[in-house]
Image (spheres, rainbow, N blue to C red):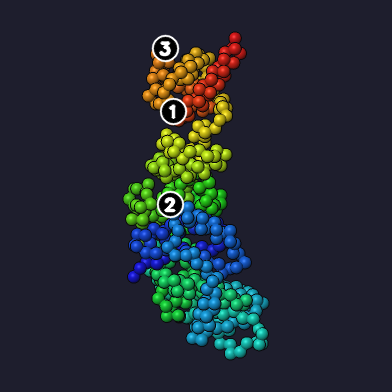
Amino acid sequence: MTLRTRFAPSPTGFLHIGGARTALFCHLHARHYGGKTILRIEDTDRERHKQEAVDAILAGMHWLGMDPDEGPFYQSDNASRHLDVAEQLIVGERAYRCYCTKDELDQMRDEQRAKGIKPKYDGRCRNRTAPPSDDAPFVVRFLRPKVGEVVWDDKIQGEIRVRNDELDDLILVRSDGSPTYNLAVVVDDHDMGINLVIRGEDHLSNTPRQIQLFEALAWEVPEYAHMPLLHGSDGAKLSKRHGAVSVLSFRDDGFLASAVNNYLVRLGWSHGDQEIFTQEEMEQLFDVCEVGRSAAIFDSDKLLWINSHHIRDAHPEELLEELIIQLEKIEIYGVERDKLLEVIPEFQERSKTMVEMAAKVSFLFVDDLPVYDPAAAKKHMKVASLAPLTELANRLEAQPEWSLAAIEKVFKSILEAFDIKMGKLAQPVRVSLTGTATSPGIYETLYLLGREKTIARLRHGVEFLEEKAAFAT
């Protein structure tokens, strides 16, 4: 039998990091066992349905490389099927119409609380033979078993038992005639052939109710795996202040999809001491049965560390599109792709995020002369550097060939002529070219910047030192 699992978000907001982790676990487990993933948008609550939320969910999953094998399907499209099943349950005496008013239900719960009883519907309409009036509003409730228990072997949480008398007769159809979540989920899981449900442990309270419905309909019950929830470093449930934001915001912040997936898979699952995984390794190794029961802690510093590894290990072509996105955000457009592919390897070791890489490479693609970092200029732009910097500019301008070997030859000639160490020349050159004291190797920096920009910026550095010398005298 082919494994079929599903990711079923509600379209009420973006795809946050917790939802992305659930989608990832579904995806990886299905890939590991040659199964299928289905995306179902659970939009039974039409008042909270937002199309922009659906679009954000689809965009987030696409960026993470988790496009479903089937879907997206929309739960609301099956409303008539859900209602037919509710009627089937009524005919089979496994559900009934409840005419209790809100006031009646409130009074019932108040009385239960006064007696120290856990408030729940007491089943008073179970044996009602006629409605109070022909037009009386009603809901449809499930006629749960009163004795026995629901038992299932959860693939993460282990064996779970819930006594039937702890549950109430849940509502299947609202008074406005719309199906509720629990009814719609059971019908759709059955109709879509879902045989493994992977979801957060916040759904544990729904599972015994859904199993009861499956059994009442004589349908095969799927297996379940309830994942522990994500918490912040302070132990509290993950929120926006911890990083529970749209997964696309991580792209905006310069994280790679491969790094986000790698980080998420380690939140509750491990494979020995290995920390860095490729997508192929995760699909080969991951099994949801190996996920731990303890709450996982979201650590932004760890994510940043993993991201730096993925940037460093990536092929330049894998970083190209992300770098273009970040460059365009700082209004650098139209850089030749071949030029970027030449530049990227020089910055992979130096960048923790693609935002950082874009900032570091930007000096190569702007025409404006750099603004010097005050600390770098104070430390490295000394008057003593004026003469060698001037001669370097002159010799480079006269150099017919622009190659790494030619640039290195000119540099060595300056070092010999002025009897200085490399640092005394390279650092003022770096500041002149980039405005900072950091860059790739100095020869690579000049080569990538190109002759025209290099000479212009060296001349600008010379002017800066000339003014400094004049002021000193």
- Closer to the camera, 393 or 220? 393
Q: Image point 41% across, 50% down: which residue?
A: 262
Q: Which amino acid does label 3 sit on?
A: Ala
Residue beneath disc 1: 447
Q: Quadrant of the N terminus?
A: bottom left
Tell which tag, 1 or 3, sits nearer the viewer: 1
Q: Earlier in the sequence, mark 2 or mark 3?
A: 2
The residue carrying pointer 2 sits among few (fewer than 14), some (14 to 19) or many (20 or more) residues within 10 Å by Cα, namely many
Q: Which of marks 1 and 3 is nearer the N terminus?
A: 3
Q: In this view, does 92 lie above or below 373?
A: below
- Closer to the camera, 278 or 154? 278
Q: Quadrant of the C terminus?
A: top right
Q: Position of residue 333 (x, y in %)?
A: 54, 39
Q: In this view, does 305 lie above or below 267?
A: above
Q: Image point 62% across, 76% down: which residue?
A: 176
Residue beneath disc 2: 261
Residue beneath disc 3: 417
Please state the total of marks drawn on the protein image. Answer: 3
Q: Image point 60% across, 77% down: which residue?
A: 177
Q: Are marks 1 and 3 in contact (CB under 8 Å)?
A: no
Q: Position of residue 46 (x, y in %)?
A: 60, 68
